[in-house]
Each structure stands twice: as structure tokens, then as C-alpha cells.
Amino acid sequence: MSLQADSNDPTVPSLERLLLAVAQGRDQQAFRALFQHFAPRVKGYARKLGADDGAAEELVQDVMLTVWQRADTFDPDLASAATWIYTIARNRRIDRIRQERRPELHPDDSMLDGDGAPPPDHQVQAAQEASRLRAVIGDLPPEQAEVLRLAYYEDKVHSEISVEQGIPLGTVKTRLRLALVRLRRAFGEEA
Amino acid sequence: MPAHHPAPELLFDYAAGSLREVQALLVASHLAYCAECRRRVAELEACGGVLLEEVAAEPVSDGLLDAVLAKLADAPAALPPQPATPPPNGILPGPLHRALGGSMGGALDGVDWVRIVPGIHLSGWSLGVGTASACLLRMAAGASVPAHRHTDHEMLLVLTGAFSDEFGRYRVGDVASYDPDTPHHAVADRDGECVCLLVQDKPLVFTGALGWLLNRGFRF
Ligand SMILES: [Zn+2]
């Protein structure tokens, strides 16, 4: 948890501020507001990934409960609220619906010395990066956007995309790598 | 910083959540050594966040918020601490440490080994999900893995020591990836043993006169 993060700081965008209020004050009003915003999106995400209505709502409950319990691990320097909740929804879905474990790196897991903190140039507000990223995703050529959509929303690894779409694997990889180059520009990096 | 990374597609599949457990174990373990790939994954997770904001929202049933609020009252204020962070100076990265059951004390003392040929052992421990499997591969100093063919993808993540093949040299944290039907001959450095996490999409099939015998030694 970043020391700079403060739920009273008006420059932090509101969803992030709500999460910090849950983390610091166990604020139920803030939690309700987060629920109103994210529950229908998490449900939409689960439905897209093939869950039926009941399973999707169970996932929503699971995710929102995890948000309440893990809010203290949210760091607005590292991720936007949507990104943080996306990772929870992704992992809980793998666990519940695909019934596999999700091998994850924990914050203390680094095998390198002294790289626990994000690099200084990454302390930019993650929420600002998100708006640049949104623009880049919106501008992707359709065939590149499709590869992203299939991976995030249809649980397809790139080799499955190749088989199911009847596209050579090399073409899928090329489209994906082109999309990744564009996405990286949203973070101000040359790929 | 590692010199050999998982393919960009693999990091992408990992961040999107479509990568299956066995391959994800290797990627997550590599991340413990690699700040660069950690940053790549964080960027792709930000992409997931944007897509979550843009997904068609589905209204939830009326009682769902109340059901969750009722559970908050029962839920502990915070989850119990995450299980099993490996001890400092251990040789196992956290995700692998947990996959092995978190009981190794960060070392390999508790692993039992099955000898394949002199100098080459595979761990009795393995993780199999679907068509993929993971286990540990131990090469004695200077030992080489016997010739084998594979019908699918194979990856190695170096945990201790180093090895070389016709494509390069791999040190701790490095990932070697082999496409199906790519002949390769891993040879451990002469100055010490090399232990790797080995991930395959299908079991190895050894070729040659020893093949029949060797294949019986595998415990995938
Ligand atoms: Zn890497």
C-alpha cells in the first residue's frame, strides 16, 4: 500500500477513492457505490465468458466479497480500480468456473534484490494510463481487436484462436504482436 | 535480469487469463526473476481493466447487493495472509514453492527424484492439468538430456545452475521454449548441477534404443 495514497486526496479519481475508503475505513457506502459500478460489469464479463446467469451472479458475489476483504492490497500507483478488479474477476473465474488454480506472483515473491517498488517512471497515475489505453484499443484495426477480444472474453489461448478461426498460427501471432506494440505506446514505451 | 523470456503471446495469454494452469505456473515463476515481464503483464492487465469497463454491463438481480452486504458482516475484516511465501534466499520462486505444497523451505531437500539416465533425474512431484504437465528436471554437472522428440510444446525455466543448447545459454530465471519437433540438446554447465522447471504439453517420448525403457521411467 502506497504511503502517498489518501482517500481524501481529491486528485485521485473517484473509483480509486472509493476503494481506498473501503480499505481504510471499511466504508459500506463506498462499497455500495463500487458494487453499483462494477457488479454489472463483472457479470457481463462472466456471461461473455460463457457462465450462465446463476454462475455469473455467484462470481459477482465472490469478486465483490474479495474486493471488500482485499481492499488494503489495492495500490493506485500500480493499477486503476478497474484493472485491480479485473485481476480479481479473472482469477476467481479461473478458480470457480474453470476449476483450476491460478499461479500468481505475490508481492513478496521477487527473487531480485530491491525491486519491490515500482520504477520511478511508473508512479504515474494508473488511471491516466487507462484513458490512453482506451483510446489505443478503440483505434486497433478490427482483426487485432478481435484477437484481444477472443483472449480476454472467450478464454482462448492464441493457438486455440488459430484453430477455431481457421487462421494460421503465425498470422494470429503477428496480429497479436502488432496489437501489443500499439498497446505499449499507451505506456509511453517503444516496443 | 533474465536474458530469455517467455514468448509475448504467453505473457498475453497469462494476463488475459486464458493460459492454462501448468503453463501459467512457469510464467508466474519467471515473473519472480523478471521485472521487465512483470511490467509487461501489468500493462496487459491494465488492458483487461479497460475491457472490463467496456464490456456490456448485465443488470444483476435486485437482492444481490443485499446478499453481499449480509456476507460482509460475517466475512473476516481481511483474508488470512496469503499462503506460503518462500523464505528469503530460497531457490524456489513463490508460485512454484506454493505449487509444491509450500513445505520445501525454499530448497529442494524434500523432492524425491526418479533417475532417467545417469546424471538426469525427474522429480516425483508433477502437476498435470489437461494435456500439459510440469515437473522438475535435474541435470548433473556436464550431463546432457538424452535425445527425445516431442509432439508438442516444451519449456524450461532455470532454477539453479545453467545449461546450454544449440540456441543459447540459459541461467537462473531464463526460459527456454521449444516448438514441437524442434530437436534440441540441453547440456548442463560443467561447474555444477542445473535444476529446471520443465513444462510440456504432452509427455516426452524418447527415441532410440533406450526409448522404450526410458519412457517407462516417466511418471507423468
Ligand atoms: Zn522476462
Image (cartoon, coloured by chain):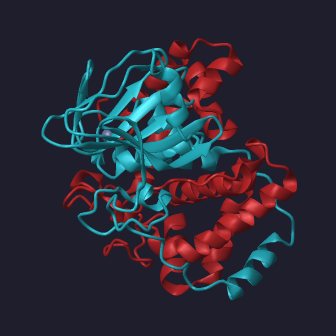
Q: Nearer the viewer, residue B58 or B10?
A: B10
Q: Nearer the viewer, residue A98 or A10?
A: A98
Q: Percent x, y for residue B135?
A: 46, 44
Tell me if I can see residue A107 in this picture: yes
Quadrant where the N terminus of chain B is found in the figure: top left
Q: Percent x, y for residue B65?
A: 77, 73
Residue at 32% over, 61% down: B107
Q: Is residue B23 above or below residue A147?
A: below
Relative placement, left or right, of A67 versus A135 is: right
Relative placement, left or right, of B218 versus B5 is: right
> Would you identify the image quadrant in which residue A123 lies?
bottom left
Ligand 1: image quarter: top left
Which tint was used for chain B?
cyan
Q: Percent x, y for residue A33?
A: 66, 71
Relative placement, left or right, of A129 versus B58 is: left
Q: Which residue of the protein is positioned furthest toward the left in this rendering? A: B191
Residue at 68% over, 45% down: B55
Count how many numbered circles sit on residues in the image: 0
Q: Percent x, y for residue B167?
A: 27, 20
Residue at 48% over, 71% down: B83
> Would you identify the image quadrant in which residue A113 lies?
bottom left
Which tint was used for chain A?
red
Tell me if I can see residue B204 in this picture: no
> Would you identify the image quadrant in which residue A36 lies?
bottom right
Residue at 87% over, 69% down: B62
Q: Is residue A92 above or below residue B174?
A: below
Quadrant where the C terminus of chain B is found in the figure: top right
Q: Nearer the viewer, residue B23 or B165?
A: B165
Relative placement, left or right, of B132 versus B146 is: right
Q: Nearer the viewer, residue A24 or A17?
A: A24
